[in-house]
Image (spheres, rainbow, N blue to C red):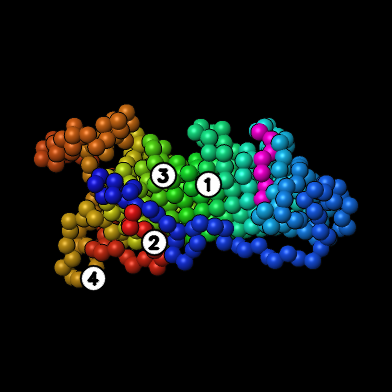
């Protein structure tokens, strides 16, 4: 607990080599095109522009909502602000449209109409280096193919009730697209629903509900991203062939705080991630569901969690290899009366291992077995979680250790645990100066 409190006082910053405080993609210099002064009717200028034309906005304010229904390039500096009080402030219903640099402010507040800052529909669309503020939904990408959403900043409403916020970035029936180098704060979720073959790279999501939420979406990749201070880092539901690689997932707090969660998801690869100070590091519910699927957790670091791995019930076809489990309250907790013996644990490092290595091969000569009476009872009676960390539960564990009559049953077994953690190829920087 002292270690957990110490980490919570630290400032977790971006992954090594990344810039945490601004969108990474820079807006290009002003291109040659049709100048649109700030006092002009932007919708009229859009409607009058030839197909494929470039509109160059000046610093100042433009009134929306504006709809682009033909191939165009709209460019503006960040001081060019497009503002609306109703509907979606900027809407694209065309192919081959590029929008760069502008600031989008406001919009309607109706969930049934999906009012947002920018609403995209079409093929080969690019949204680069824009800022969205004070909008219900930030960036909506709906029924798009080959959309590029790069280097944007979305600042949500920050309402205390997260369900009343809109999503920061929402992909809906969108395929073969790229979402990279974006910063999303104080929104509800980053959503990827009914959307396949997309890449989410180097994004940062903070102080939101779901850092990224997949549902019915297949063959997607999330890598090199940073999720800090959300309720859930990444949650994968009813999806397959998902890769989560080299991400930082930290400080997902509260009773429902989860670093990575899976529900009925298969062929998920969780590799080289750092999960720090989450209430639950990894949560698994009926995953994988398909007997032909296997989920693999490889070289992840799970530290400072109340529970490193929480299984809704006993699971199978889940492989945990070369991971680090350190400074956690419990390595595993299983709902009902289940256990984790149907999962494969091989070559992981556990700071609670008390075995030996006489042959010097770096692997323990006796298995690691996790047994804890309080954890076993919490899995069977969830209401006991209210006493988690209380002296009464510590006494329960003591009774389980010294009295054979109450010896807890085995919940996890690793036949050859590592004596030392496997070297990580990627490490997030942690600022401990504060």
Q: Secondary structure at mark 1?
A: strand
**Relative to 61, is 351 on the left or the right?**
left
- Badge 1 is on which residue? 185
Q: Residues within 10 Å of mark 2 (few under 14, many from 20)?
A: some
**Mark pair 1, 4: CA separation:** 46 Å
Judged by depth in the image, the label closer to the viewer, 3 or 1, is 1
Q: Nearer the viewer, residue 399 or 117?
A: 117
422 up-or-down from 303: above or below: below
**Relative to 169, is 309 on the left or the right?**
left
**Relative to 271, is 104 on the left or the right?**
right
- Badge 2 is on which residue? 429
Magenta stretch containing residue 240, yes or no? no
- Badge 4 is on which residue? 361
The span shown in magenta is 103-109
Q: Secondary structure at mark 3?
A: loop
Precedes in sequence: disc 3 or disc 1: 1
Position in image of residue 278 (x %, y %)? 37, 46
Q: Residue at x 22, y 53 (%)?
A: 352
- Badge 3 is on which residue? 252
């Amino acid at each position: 607990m002292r270690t957990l409190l110490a980490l919570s006082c630290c400032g977790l910053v971006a992954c090594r080599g990344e810039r945490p405080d601004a969108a990474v993609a820079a807006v290009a210099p002003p291109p040659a095109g049709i100048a649109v002064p700030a006092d002009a009717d932007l919708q009229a200028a859009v409607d009058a522009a030839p197909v494929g034309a470039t509109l160059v906005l000046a610093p100042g304010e433009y009134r929306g909502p504006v709809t682009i229904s033909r191939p165009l390039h709209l460019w503006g500096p960040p001081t060019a602000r497009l503002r609306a009080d109703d509907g979606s402030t900027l809407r694209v219903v065309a192919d081959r449209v590029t929008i760069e640099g502008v600031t989008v402010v406001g919009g309607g507040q109706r969930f049934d109409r999906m009012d947002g800052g920018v609403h995209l529909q079409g093929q080969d669309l690019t949204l680069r280096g824009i800022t969205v503020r004070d909008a219900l939904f930030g960036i909506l990408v709906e029924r798009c193919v080959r959309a590029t959403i790069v280097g944007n900043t979305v600042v949500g409403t920050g309402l205390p009730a997260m369900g009343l916020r809109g999503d920061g970035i929402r992909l809906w029936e969108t395929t073969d697209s790229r979402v990279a180098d974006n910063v999303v704060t104080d929104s509800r979720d980053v959503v990827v629903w009914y959307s396949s073959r997309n890449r989410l790279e180097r994004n940062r999501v903070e102080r939101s509900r779901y850092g990224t939420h997949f549902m019915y979406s297949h063959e997607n990749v999330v890598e090199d991203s940073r999720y800090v201070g959300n309720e859930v880092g990444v949650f994968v539901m009813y999806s397959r062939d998902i890769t989560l690689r080299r991400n930082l997932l930290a400080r997902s707090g509260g009773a429902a705080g989860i670093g990575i969660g899976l529900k009925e998801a298969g062929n998920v690869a969780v590799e080289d991630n750092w999960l720090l100070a989450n209430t639950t590091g990894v949560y698994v519910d009926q995953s994988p569901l398909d007997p032909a699927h296997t989920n693999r957790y490889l070289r992840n670091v799970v530290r400072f969690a109340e529970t490193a791995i929480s299984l809704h019930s006993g699971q199978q076809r889940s492989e945990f290899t070369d991971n680090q489990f350190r400074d956690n309250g419990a390595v595993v907790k299983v709902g009902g009366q289940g256990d984790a013996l149907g999962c494969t644990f091989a070559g992981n490092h556990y700071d609670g291992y008390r075995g030996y290595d006489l042959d010097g091969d770096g692997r323990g000569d006796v298995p690691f077995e996790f047994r804890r009476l309080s954890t076993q009872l919490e899995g069977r009676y969830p209401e006991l979680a209210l006493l988690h960390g209380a002296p009464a539960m510590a006494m329960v564990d003591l009774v389980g250790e010294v009295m054979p009559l109450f010896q807890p049953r085995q919940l996890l077994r690793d036949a050859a645990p590592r004596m030392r953690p496997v070297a990580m190829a990627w490490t997030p920087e942690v600022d401990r100066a504060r």
